[in-house]
Amino acid sequence: MSRVLLQDASFSAETSDGSVRTILHPTTLDLSEQRIAVIGANGSGKSTLLRMLNGLLLPTTGSVSVDGLDTRADGSAVRRQVGFVFTDPLSQLVMPTPLEDLELSLRRRIKSATARRQEALRILQEYGLEPLNDSSIYELSGGERQLVALATVLAVEPKLLVLDEPSTLLDLRNTRLLRSRLAGLSQQLILSTHDLELAVDCSRALVIEAGHVVFDGPAADAVAYYRRMYS
Amino acid sequence: MRGHAYLVGAFCPGRSAVHRAPLWLKGLLLLAVAAASFAFPNAYLASAVLAAVVIVHFAARLPAARLWHPVRMMLIFLVLIAGFQYWQSGPATAWQVVAGIMATVLASNILTATTPVSTLLDSLEWAVEPLRRFGADPERFSLTVSLMLRSIPYVIGAFDDVRDAARARGLERNVRARTLPVLIGTVAYARATGEALAARGLGDPQD
């Protein structure tokens, strides 16, 4: 299990009028549970927090580390350890077809082209995506794309998987499919979501409001707290 | 982005002889097409080479649309070149130059359509490997080239989308309205691609 530490980590950005807006206020967290959910309203700072965990964003103040590796000083080592799944799978996929995108993920791990292709085909088969091996990523449904995106990130074998609202663009059927896939993963997961059913399945949840962590505890209590905030 | 632009540069799976041919042979033939088209200025030769490329395209069982799209993308460019050459040297030279450009572009299109990206990446890595002793990183080099190829259809698609959006608001003659969103979109696309690679720990220097 990875241990993610945020020490007074904050994130600020300059706005178009030149003023500085703090998106995440100084936050100290120790994240080591198997399943952690981050819930909160749109624009509350969930995605910013998640993006800081694999160094997609660097903290303006404070530090973020994963198993002792600092995201600023050891960025590439952290990124190899922490996979990130975006809300929009099209942002995730960089190659024209699912097969080619998976092969890209496997390049560092498997040097032989033949073995790489076989492994990519095996993964696609495991996800039930084999008929779509050579389809354009633009021809896939939202659910298929999200599964391909998940498979491409898992193919690099990260120890920790961070998912930013993975079910937001999915219908009920695909949300359930994704949820069952996530439930079967051995990796540690940290995910942000508006799907409270998904959040309540986690062992711990954080509630974020206006850039502050306003609740941190068991997922059921966090969901109840979040519901009360808007009741 | 529009799906039609995506057709350009993408791999079309198949089992034709062209698909099965080794990459070095396809690369050599591409060079031969370019050399025949430009090193020996002759309108008949250029026509024959263009016809041969079109035959190979259909022999590879590639869709007809894929033949037209690259030409359509270059149409304005081809018309301008043809006009200039016609004015300077006459119709035979104008046709020879235009046919040569089309043959070379279509031949390179056949190469990318019949070769999986991973094979292109492996070959590029192999080609750059000797430069490793000078500090080059073959994996990053091949990844950069493949992402560059991948981004060409995106940029073309963005031009089409922005043109239609400008037209819908009666701004088709406004150069700013037709170019600025493409620039912004392209920078955003480059950023998103970088993030997509970082999300999988790809593209960083190898330890």
Image: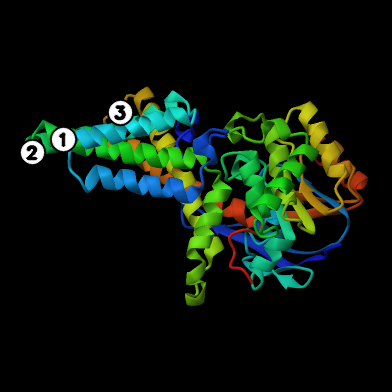
Q: Secondary structure at mark 1?
A: helix
Q: Is disc 1 in the same subunit as disc 3?
A: yes
Figure disc tally: 3
Q: Are marks 1 and 3 in contact (CB under 8 Å)?
A: no
Q: Is residue B141 above or below residue B158?
A: below
| Mark closer to the chain start, 1 or 3 | 1
Asked whether A66 or A231 is in front, the reply is: A66
Q: Return the chain for callout 3.
A: B
Please determine whether, in this image, residue A1 is positioned above or below residue A187. below
Towards the viewer: B52 or A231:
B52
Image point (60%, 43%), residue name = A91
Q: Amino acid at mark 1?
A: Ala
Q: Mark 1 sits on what residue?
A: B94
Q: Residue at x 37, y 30 (%)?
A: B54
Residue at the (57%, 44%) spot, across then down: A95
Distance, label 3 to label 2, CA atoms, is 34 Å
Where is mark 3, residue-wise? B172
Residue annotated with mark 2: B89
To the question of a shared chain for discs 1 and 2, the answer is yes
Q: Check disc 3 and give the amino acid type.
A: Glu
x, y percent for residue A52: 68, 59
Q: Could you say which quadrant of the image residue B78 lies in?
A: top left
Task: Estimate the spatial distance between the alpha carbons at disc 1 and disc 2, rounded to whole Å.
Answer: 7 Å
Image mark 2: chain? B
Nearer to us in this view, B5 or B118 = B118
From this viewpoint, is residue A165 visible? no
Asked if marks 1 and 2 touch (Cβ < 8 Å), the reply is yes
Which marked residue is nearer to the observer: mark 1 or mark 3? 1
Q: Are marks 3 and 2 on the same chain?
A: yes
For the N terminus of chain A, the quadrant is bottom right
Disc on res. A89:
none
